[in-house]
Image (cartoon, rainbow, N blue to C red):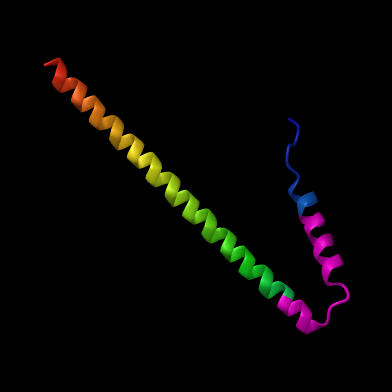
C-alpha cells in the first residue's frame, strides 16, 4: 500500500518554516510570534466549528423536510 500522506515530512517542513521565520528574533519577538500564531489557530478552529454547526443545521432541516414530505405522501395515498 502506497502512503498518501507523510506525517513526519509534514512536521519537518513546518519546523523548517518556523525556524526560518524565527531564527533572527529575540525571545520577546518569538513569544509574540507564537502568541499571534496561537490566536490565528484559535480563530481558524472557531470558524471551522461555526461552519460545521451551519452544515449540521442545514442537514437537519433537509432531513426534517424529507420526513414531512414522506408523511404527506402517505396521507394522500389513504
With 54 as the anchor, is 26 left or right in this view?
Answer: right
Q: Main secondary structure of the magenta part?
A: helix
Q: Residue at x 76, y 45 (%)?
A: 6
Give the magenta-colored segment's residue range: 11-32
Residue 8: x %, y % from top left: 77, 51
Residue at 24 percent across and 25 percent down: it is 70
Q: Is residue 72 above or below residue 13?
A: above
Name the residue furthest left.
78
In the rendered image, residue 60, in percent from the top left (x then y), is placed at 35, 41
Front residue of 45/10: it is 45
Number of marks in the rendered image: 0
Please report the residue visible at 81 percent of the width from the left and 56 percent of the height from the top: 12
Instruction: Choose top left, top right, bottom left or bottom right for residue 61.
Output: top left
- Where the C terminus falls, by quadrant? top left
State which quadrant residue 77 falls in. Answer: top left
- Find out whether residue 12 is within the magenta segment: yes
Please state if 35 lies on the left or on the right of 61 as rendered: right
State the image coordinates of residue 63 (x, y, percent, origin top left).
Answer: 33, 35
Please tell me whether residue 8 belongs to the stretch shown in magenta. no
Amino acid at each position: 500500500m502506497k502512503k498518501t500522506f507523510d506525517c513526519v515530512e509534514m512536521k519537518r517542513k513546518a519546523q523548517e518554516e518556523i525556524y526560518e521565520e524565527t531564527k533572527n528574533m529575540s525571545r520577546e519577538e518569538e513569544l509574540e510570534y507564537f502568541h499571534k500564531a496561537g490566536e490565528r489557530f484559535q480563530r481558524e478552529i472557531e470558524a471551522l466549528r461555526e461552519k460545521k454547526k451551519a452544515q449540521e443545521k442545514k442537514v437537519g432541516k433537509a432531513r426534517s423536510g424529507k420526513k414531512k414530505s414522506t408523511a404527506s405522501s402517505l396521507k394522500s395515498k389513504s
